[in-house]
Image (cartoon, rainbow, N blue to C red):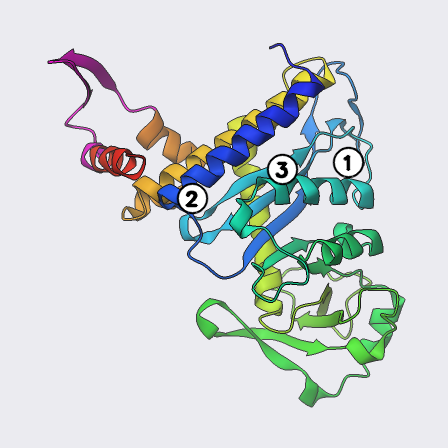
Amino acid sequence: MAAAAAHLPRVRAARAAARARAWQAGAAPAGGELRIDFDATISIAHSEKQDAAATWKKTFGFHPLLAFLDRPEVAGGEGLAGLLRPGNAGSNTAADHVTVLALALAQLPAGARPRPGEADSPRVLARSDSAGATHVFAAACRTRGVEFSFGFPVDERVQAIVGLIPDQCWHPAVEDGDELRDGAWVAEATGMIDLGSWPEGSRLILRKERPHPGAQLTFTDVDGHRITAFLTDTPAGLELRHRQHARVEDRIRQAKAAGLRNFPCRGQEENSAWLEAVLAAADLVCWAKLICFTHVPSLARCEIAAFRYRVLHVAAQLTRSARRACLRIDRTWRWATQIAEGFHRLRAAFA
C-alpha cells in the first residue's frame, strides 16, 4: 500500500462527498439532533511499527481516537473521523479531541453542519466519557456551535454533595420508551459545585444506582449506590441520551471486526490510510443497511459478522445477456429475495 500524509485530505474529501450523496439517496438521518460519539480504543501491534508504543493496559500498539455518528435505526454508526495515535497517547488529550471534532464536522454534509449564532442551525451533540471532559474541548464545541455531554469524574467534590441532595430531588431514571428504570435515580447538582471554569450554561447531572447482584463496590460508591456524573450544556433529554453514548463501544467492536483490530503496515502514513479505509467500510455498511434493508430487521440490525455472512459473501454469478449485466443469486439462499429487492432499491436511489 502506497500512501502519503498529503493524500489523506483527498481521501477524507472523497468520503465527505460520498456521504452527502448517500444522504441524498435516502441514508440521511430522519431529522432532529445529530449525535457524535467520541471514544478511544487500543489496537495491538505484534511487531515493531512506527509510533507503536506501550499502552496503559500494559500492551503494545496504538491508541486511536474515533468519532462515530450514532445511527440507532440500524443499530450502527457512520465512521466520521479517526486519529491514529501512539499507544502511550493520553485518554484525555484535549488537542486530539479538538482535531477529531474538526475532522468529524467536515465529514457532515454542508446542510447538517452547525452554524454558530444562527437560530435555525442544525443541532449537533458531542458525547464522550470523562476522557473528553476538558475545558479546551468544551470550549471548542461551544465555538463550533456543537452542544456537549461529557462524563464527569466522580471526585471528592462530587462525593461530598451526593449525601446533601434531599431524597425528593432524586427522580427515577428512564429507559427507552419512557419506562422507569428500577433502582436508578437522577438529580441535578449544578448549583452545588463550582462550574465557573466551564462554558456558560453548563449543568452537572448525577445518577445513583443500586449495583447489580454480585457487583464489586468501589471507593466512589456512596451508601451502597454506584454514582456517575456527566456535564452538559443542553436543556432537556439529558440522562438517557448521555447513557446511550455507551453504544459507541458496539461501533468500535464492529470496526475491529472489519480491520481496526490490527494495523498491518510498518509506516505511520500507511496505517493512517488503513484507518480511513476502516472508517469508509463502516460508512458503506451503514448506508447499505439504511438504503437497502431498513424493511428487513434481520439484515438492518445485525452486526458486521452476520451482515458479511448473509449479504456480502453470498454466492452469485455475474452474467451478461442482451447488453445487460445480471447478478444471479442462488435461489436457495435464505436472504436471496431480500438481497435482490435491496439491490433494486439501491439502483433506484442513485438513478
Residue at the left extreme of this rendering: 322
**Label 1 amino acid?**
Lys
Position of 90 with respect to 145 (left or right) is right
Distance from Cα at disc 1 to Cα at disc 3: 24 Å
Q: Position of residue 213 (x, y in %)?
A: 61, 64
Look at 36% across and 45% down and name the residue there.
26
Q: Is residue 209 magenta?
A: no
Residue 318, relative to residue 345: is it above or below? above
Label number found at residue 57:
1
Within 10 Å of the Cα at label 2, are there few (<14), some (14-19), or many (20+) other Cα atoms?
some
Asked whether disc 1 touches disc 3, contact meaning CB atoms under 8 Å apart, the reply is: no
Chain part drawn in magenta: 313-338
Look at 28% across and 34% down and name the residue there.
351
Of callouts 1 and 3, which one flags the residue occurring earlier in the amino acid sequence? 1
Residue with the mark numbered 2: 23
Within 10 Å of the Cα at label 1, are there few (<14), some (14-19), or many (20+) other Cα atoms?
few
Q: Position of residue 126 (x, y in %)?
A: 65, 54
Residue with the mark numbered 3: 81
Residue at the front extreme of this rendering: 118
Of callouts 1 and 2, which one flags the residue occurring earlier in the amino acid sequence? 2
Distance from Cα at disc 1 to Cα at disc 2: 39 Å
Residue 216 visible at all: no
Look at 66% across and 39% down and name the residue there.
103
